[in-house]
């Protein structure tokens, strides 16, 4: 811990520095590969939408003999053979999800499940969600997502500047797209809990980005008049100064989410937790990555296109060249008189 604190101090003072801005093409290439992989996964596999979005029927049976194989056998005996998803919840529950069923099919499924597991029909928790309800939930989720992005972009434009808002929104879209791609690859169902997880991702990603941008704004205040460094150099210093803080914050946030995902959903079998915890775990990691490697480099690239920042870069470059050449010129001038032979005036 003391060693990490020492590194943080050197990073903050500029004694040690990582060139995040200068190597932005590497980060862009890596993120581009992740986005292409996510797009390919979404195109080939797609998202596994829960019945809350696409509609259908759900049957939950509580029994000590609950098993996936027995539930699948009961559903097939009831005459339902398409779009069947069977999940085991804990040690004594099994949940069956199907497409929309008729009243006769629903009764047949309940009877077969009751007979297979030796329970009464009344003890089976049945839910029927129509397609119109699923479409309404989907529309509300999209409204919430776009409304959130609009409000956040408006706030960032007012609190900081428009280019910071653009860079932050690009980073957020980057995080959500990669998270959705991994979600499609793993094959987890997209439920309302997943949507809540995605919205939480947006908030955390923006929080980390705003922390970095606030330091960037502090370092670049009056930079055009001072001429000490370019905008990219000042922004890179800001990223280094907040690097340890971002790492510590992300680690502390990932520990409880990882416990929910790997212990709660993995070991204890709490299937209802995995939808939320997976989205949070991936989103927290990608949010930290994007705030350092994506958002700030994009901001620096946008600002460096401004005429004032281009003129500043030329002034800083010219001053650096003069600083390098000055010692050699001084040595040459100083060597001259010492190397010349002394002349004596004849009396």
Image (cartoon, rainbow, N blue to C red):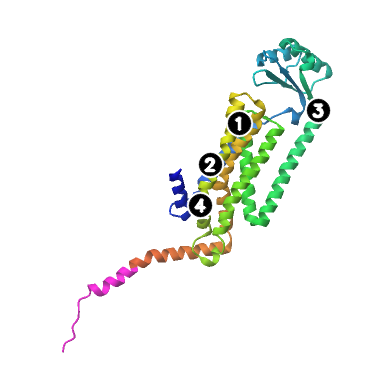
The reply to whether discs 2 and 3 touch (Cβ–Cβ < 8 Å) is no
Residue under the image location 68 percent in, 49 percent down: 152
Q: Determine whether, in the image, residue 158 is placed left or right of residue 102.
A: left
**Mark 1: few, some, or many residues within 10 Å (few <14, many ≥20)?**
many
Q: Where's residue 189, x and y in %? A: 67, 29
**Mark 4: few, some, or many residues within 10 Å (few <14, many ≥20)?**
many
Q: Where's residue 173, x and y in %? A: 64, 43
Badge nearest the viewer, 3 or 1:
1
Does residue 337 belong to the magenta stretch?
A: yes
Dot 3 corresponds to which residue?
A: 130
- Sequence-first disc among 4 and 2: 2
Dot 4 corresponds to which residue?
A: 241
Spatial CA distance of label 2 from label 3 is 42 Å
User: Relative to residue 323, is residue 291 depicted above or below?
Assistant: above
Dot 2 corresponds to which residue?
A: 30
Residue 84 in view (yes/no) = no
Dot 1 corresponds to which residue?
A: 260
**Mark 3: few, some, or many residues within 10 Å (few <14, many ≥20)?**
some
Spatial CA distance of label 3 from label 1 is 31 Å
Q: Give the range drawn in magenta.
A: 329-347
């Amino acid at each position: 811990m003391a060693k990490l604190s020492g590194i943080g101090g050197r990073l903050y003072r500029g004694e040690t520095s990582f060139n995040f801005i200068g190597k932005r093409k590497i980060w862009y290439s890596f993120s581009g590969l992740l986005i292409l992989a996510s797009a390919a996964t979404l195109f080939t596999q797609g998202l596994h939408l829960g019945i809350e979005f696409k509609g259908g029927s759900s049957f939950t049976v509580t029994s000590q003999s609950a098993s996936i194989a027995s539930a699948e056998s009961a559903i097939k005996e009831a005459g339902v053979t398409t779009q069947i998803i069977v999940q085991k919840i804990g040690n004594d529950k099994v949940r069956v999800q199907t497409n929309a069923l008729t009243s006769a099919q629903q009764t047949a499924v309940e009877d077969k499940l009751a007979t297979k597991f030796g329970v009464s029909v009344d003890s089976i928790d049945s839910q029927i969600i129509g397609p119109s309800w699923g479409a309404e939930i989907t529309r509300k989720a999209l409204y919430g997502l776009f409304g959130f992005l609009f409000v956040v972009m408006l706030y960032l434009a007012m609190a900081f500047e428009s280019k910071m808002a653009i860079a932050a929104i690009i980073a957020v879209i980057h995080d959500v797209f990669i998270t959705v791609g991994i979600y499609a690859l793993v094959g987890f169902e997209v439920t309302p809990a997943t949507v809540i997880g995605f919205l939480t991702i947006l908030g955390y990603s923006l929080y980390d980005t705003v922390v970095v941008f606030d330091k960037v704004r502090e370092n670049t205040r009056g930079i055009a008049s001072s001429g000490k460094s370019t905008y990219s150099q000042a922004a890179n210093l800001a990223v280094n100064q907040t690097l340890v803080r971002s790492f510590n914050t992300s680690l502390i946030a990932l520990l409880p989410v990882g416990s929910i995902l790997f212990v709660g959903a993995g070991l204890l079998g709490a299937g209802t937790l995995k939808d939320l915890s997976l989205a949070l775990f991936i989103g927290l990691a990608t949010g930290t990555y994007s705030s350092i490697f994506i958002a700030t480099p994009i901001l620096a690239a946008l600002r460096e296109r401004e005429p004032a920042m281009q003129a500043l870069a030329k002034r800083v470059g010219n001053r650096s060249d003069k600083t390098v050449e000055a010692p050699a010129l001084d040595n040459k001038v100083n060597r001259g008189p010492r190397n010349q032979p002394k002349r004596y005036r004849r009396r």
